[in-house]
Image (tube, rainbow, N blue to C red):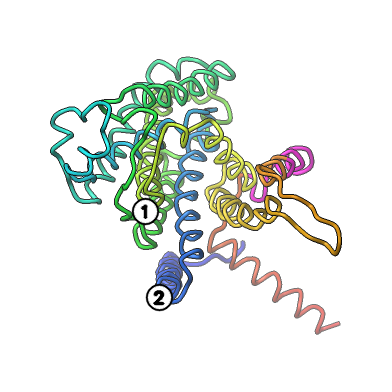
Amino acid sequence: MEKTLTFKAKFFLTILFILAIFLLLLTANNKASDYLILILNLMAINIIFAVSLTFINGITGIFSLGHVGFIAIGAYVSSILTLSPAQKEISFLIKPLIYPLNVIQIPFLPAIIIAGLVAAAFGYLVAAPSLRLIGDYLAIATLGLGEVVRIVANNTWSITNGALGLKSIPQYSNLWWTWGFALITVIFISSLVKSSYGRALKAIREDPVAAKSMGINVFSHQVVTFVIGSFFAGVGGALWAHLITTIDPKSFMFQKTFEILIMVVIGGLGSISGAIIGASLYTVGLEFLRVLEEPISIGSIYIPGIPGMRMVVLSLILIIIMLFWRRGIMGKNEITWDGIYKLIMKVKNKNRMREDE
């Protein structure tokens, strides 16, 4: 029987890990450049997006392509709630913002929670009819949702300011907000996946018919999963809006969902750890590949920058992964303290065997 860590040891290691993250963020916040802080903020927000989509697509097996719709809802709701009445009057030039939104201004934290709840409510309205579909039909229905949200945002001038979007959004998002909510998202969803409810979700993913025959209410489990994923997508959207300070309907094209899918697939569809790794690699890799879009001079040879080239390279990487490494980095596996402990003991045993030889 393989030796595993006790619950107290795992709890202690988890606390140490959280403290280490806190110290790293504190150091970055005090000493890092604004550019590095921006990358770290984007990494945390992308982790929220990737983990919430993994919960829907990977853990439960719902093929959703409408995640960007809930991100947009969260972004717009939180932005409207935190903008001051004076800013709203200046921004809404063509049509004034409807009452009582034009006179409301609330703090950032309640705005984030409300944004998540509104996104969750829309998630329920979408999930209740759509989840009766399966396979490609469900994917097309959720894809349509993202486009509906974008088109509505583009035309409801008295709510979203239409194509002009919202500007001068307060830049409340910082390392503490983004990484704090990323940690909450990971802990909540990981705990849920490890519970009996999570085992039921995995059973639905593997075989819905067999899960139903075992007494699992497949439809209600899928709806709850979709609502939870929508909530955290809305929270991520709120953080994103208050980081970039400017949003419009073009910010929420299908490309945004495609980017999140890349993170999930790279990390491993069905793994929370993989979603974190995929989101981190995507965020950092996207910045490293920015050099491809800038002019390069090699001696007398001049190579002009090609806009959008980094997305082409990322798409090629995704194709290669799909062809040769379909499970992604983690597959359906998770990084656990027991797994790390076993790996360390395995390495130690190998070193001892070599020394004995």
What residue do we see at 35% from left, 55% from top? 173
What residue do we see at 36% from left, 35% from top? 165
User: Looking at numbered disc 1 in the image, what kind of residue is underneath it?
Assistant: Phe
Query: Compared to 33, does 65 lie above or below?
Result: above
User: Looking at numbered disc 2 in the image, what kind of residue is underneath it?
Assistant: Asn
Which residue bears the numbered disc 1?
A: 181
Left or right? Give the position of 86 relative to 54: left
Which mark is in front, 2 or 1? 2
What residue do we see at 50% from left, 63% from top? 35
Query: Compared to 339, does 193 lie above or below?
Result: above
45 or 215, nearer to the observer = 45
Which residue bears the numbered disc 2?
A: 30
Query: Compared to 232, does 354 lie above or below?
Result: below
Please report contact status of discs 2 and 1: CB closer than 8 Å, yes or no: no
Left or right? Give the position of 225 relative to 262: left
Q: Give the range drawn in magenta.
A: 316-331
Q: Does the rendering let one see residue 297?
A: yes
Disc 2, SS: helix
Left or right? Give the position of 282 relative to 90: right
Q: Position of residue 76 (x, y in %)?
A: 32, 36
Left or right? Give the position of 271 relative to 291: left
Disc 1, SS: helix
Rendered-image quadrant of the N terminus: bottom right
Which of disc 1 and disc 2 is earlier in sequence? Answer: 2
